[in-house]
Image (spheres, rainbow, N blue to C red):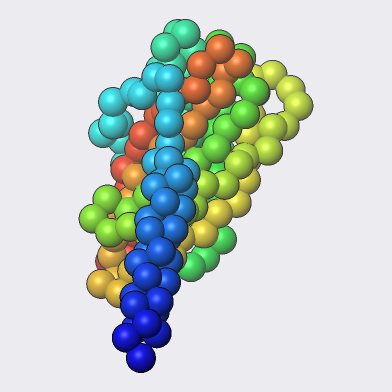
Amino acid sequence: MLTKNLLLDAAILLTLAILGVIGYRLAPLLSPKADIALPLSSCKLEQQSCTATLPDGGELEFSIEPRPIPALKPLQLQASFRGSEVRKVEVDFAGTEMKMGYNRPQLTGQPGSPPRFSGQASLPVCITGSMEWDATVLVDTGTALVAVPFRFQTGN
């Protein structure tokens, strides 16, 4: 009986250790790693499209529609660039007060000049009804990964 309890305790401890290692390894996926992180924009995405100047002097214009931004509904994401070479664009959504899980859609490039990227996303609903979110636009220029953060509200 004592041996069974010791084996069970050892199995539980081993399982917890394995889960800890897996969590530690997967944690970087939850927060975007960028070469350059711009300061948080004061622009309100729930009211308008927002612009930011990139380190190479180019400009990003980013928008989420419809406005106001709803939870649990399809959202249209648009990113257009002037004066910058862009290979890939992703948008990382994270709740500012509550972790809501991994949500990082990749936008699809559209041919033409200026470069335009678009895609769809949806946000989970918060039990409080309204929630503050960070939308970090991750811009891969080929030479650097630039993080451009914006903040917005959903709900009431």
Residue at figure coordinates x 36%, y 34% from the top left: 149
| Residue 49 percent coordinates (x, y) | 43, 37
Using the rendered image of the protein, determine whether residue 74 is visible from the camera's viewpoint. Answer: yes
Q: Nearer the viewer, residue 110 or 142?
A: 142
Query: Where the C terminus falls, by quadrant?
Result: bottom left
Residue at figure coordinates x 69%, y 19% from the top left: 113
Q: Nearer the viewer, residue 135 or 68?
A: 135
Q: Residue furthest bottom?
A: 1
Position of residue 108 in the picture relative to residue 156 (left or right): right
Question: Which corner quadrant of the image does residue 31 belong to?
Answer: top left
Question: Which corner quadrant of the image does residue 82 belong to?
Answer: top right
Residue at figure coordinates x 39%, y 47% from the top left: 24
Query: Where the N terminus falls, by quadrant?
Result: bottom left
Q: Nearer the viewer, residue 107 or 114?
A: 107
Residue at figure coordinates x 34%, y 23% from the top left: 38
Position of residue 10 in the picture relative to residue 78 (left or right): left
| Residue 122 percent coordinates (x, y) | 51, 59
Q: Is residue 44 above or below residue 68?
A: above
Q: Residue furthest top?
A: 56
Q: Nearer the viewer, residue 8 or 96?
A: 8
| Residue 58 percent coordinates (x, y) | 49, 13
| Residue 19 percent coordinates (x, y) | 42, 60
Using the rendered image of the protein, determine whether residue 71 is visible from the camera's viewpoint. Answer: no
Q: Residue furthest right?
A: 111
Question: Which corner quadrant of the image does residue 85 belong to?
Answer: top right
Q: Is residue 70 above or below residue 57?
A: below
